[in-house]
Amino acid sequence: MIGVIFGPPGSGKGTQAARIETEFELAHLSTGEILRGEASRRSAVGRRVARVMSAGDLVPDELIIDIVARRLRRPDVRRGVLLDGFPRTVEQAKALDELLAKDGRKVDFVIALEVPERSLVERLIKRAREQGRADDTRKAIAERMFEYRTLTAAVLDYYRLRGHRVIEIPGVGPVESVFDRIKKDLSISPSPR
Ligand code: AMP
């Protein structure tokens, strides 16, 4: 099973992804986490990634596609994977389809978390206070929202138009209630194959 968890910054993707992976025994692939690891290195790439991320911009498609392609070749992905934070552009979505098609696989479901923008900014500011993530400054948050609206939102239309199973989930309320909704929807509706 190949799944994508999709939603604007602060929609709770990472939190829900961790629960879904445990429940459905899927490998975890968070591009944000991989890139934060990369950014903590002193290499030239690491420094470049750190700069892009702290400004709230997206790293170049080629870089992230290459990282994901390598990660998808690892054996733990065979039984299934949940992609968190990827794809974020239509180019990335196309590249993912091509990568998966080589092995006769495809994206089986897309979970789209829906949260109003006002609540997102509040959540991100709160996370900045609690965790101190470098890209949780007001300026970087505004940029990430802009990137989401202008580049990432179109990815959902890409999946809808191509007939993938898109599950829309209201991402407001307690974490456990959101997870219950996801669990219910993922368990009942059959995956179109
Ligand atoms: P996240 O943890 O998913 O919010 O990602 C944090 C940051 O990592 C983003 O704001 C981007 O700078 C970068 N990033 C993560 N995933 C991608 C991606 N698929 N494409 C480009 N940049 C990404």
Image (cartoon, helix red, strand yellow):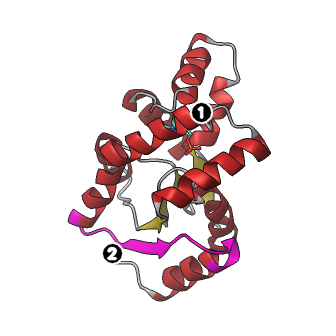
- In the picture, the disc for residue 35 is 1
How many other residues sit within 10 Å of disc 2, few (<14), some (14-19) or many (≥20)?
few
Label 1: few (<14), some or many (≥20) within 10 Å?
A: some
Q: Quadrant of residue 174?
A: bottom right
Give the extent of the magenta segment.
Answer: 161-177
Residue 9 visible in this rendered orientation of the protein: yes
Left or right: residue 47 versus residue 145 is right
Q: Residue at x 41, y 74 (%)?
A: 167
User: Residue 4 at x, y = what percent?
Assistant: 47, 59
Give the quadrant of residue 137.
Answer: top right
Residue named by callout 2: 193
Quarter holding the C terminus is bottom left
Name the side, left or right, on which 177 lies relative to 140.
right
Amino acid beneath label 2: Arg
Q: Amino acid at mark 1?
A: Leu
The one nearer the camera, 158 or 170, is 170
